[in-house]
Amino acid sequence: MNSARRSFVLFLVYAAIGFGLVVTPYVDREFVGAFVQLIAAISGGLIDLFGGSVVVMGAALQAPANNFAVLVDNGCSGLEATILVIAATLAFPTSWKFHLIGAAICSLAILGVNLLRVISLFYIGQYSREWFDWAHLYAWDVLIMIDGLVAYALWIRFVRAREGGADARA
């Protein structure tokens, strides 16, 4: 099996394992639930830090002024894009050191942008339900995936530069 085909098959296997784990009742209850609550807590903390007013209730962010609330749910956690980028970094032909660096950096890029997503939706929704729906259903999904692709492409560039540099010195 050639390298590209092997990487593609590994990507599918890793992605299936990741998504399979996330949908198991135990992982969904014990990890995903806690994860979305953490995202809500961090988002609420950032809103507070920058002078906004928010009440965090579990995985929900509520605006006290008008009672608008955003619920951070499983599909809004950035977890799906994170699983895909981790699967892609693990499938790429390189050392485990670079796999772990790539998985960590690309995941942080996605999760960081996802925090911006949650916070922006919290504010957009207070002013326009139409804009909220558009941003939530279309714009942010695309932006999260683009973020993952850019982070992955930059990581590949980093890996190739490091591996090329090591080969040139040998």
Image: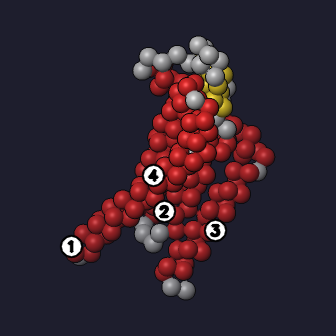
Q: Is residue 5 visible?
A: yes
CA–CA distance between discs 1 and 4? 33 Å
Local crowd size for mark 2, using a 10 Å CA cut-off: few (<14), some (14–19), many (≥20) = many
CA–CA distance between discs 1 and 3? 35 Å
Q: Which of marks 1 and 2 is nearer the N terminus?
A: 2
Determine whether label 1 and label 2 are within 8 Å by CB.
no
Instruction: Tell me if residue 40 comes above or below residue 158 in the rendering.
Output: above
Local crowd size for mark 4, using a 10 Å CA cut-off: few (<14), some (14–19), many (≥20) = many
Q: Nearer the viewer, residue 93 or 151?
A: 151
Q: Earlier in the sequence, mark 2 or mark 3?
A: 3
- Which residue, given by chain and number where applicable, does mark 4 sit on? 147
Residue 140: x and y in percent read: 53, 45
Q: Is mark 3 on a helix, strand or loop?
A: helix
Instruction: Tell me if residue 53 comes above or below residue 15 in the rendering.
Output: above
- Which residue, given by chain and number where applicable, does mark 2 sit on? 89
Quadrant including the C terminus = bottom left
Which label lies toward us, 1 or 3? 3
Q: Which of 138 and 110 is in front in this view?
A: 138
Residue 25: x and y in percent read: 78, 46
Q: Can residue 41 be seen in this view?
A: no
Which label lies toward us, 3 or 4? 4
CA–CA distance between discs 1 and 2? 25 Å
Quadrant including the N terminus = bottom right
Q: Which of marks 1 and 4 is nearer the N terminus?
A: 4
Instruction: Tell me if residue 147 comes above or below residue 118 in the rendering.
Output: below
Residue 169 is tagged as 1
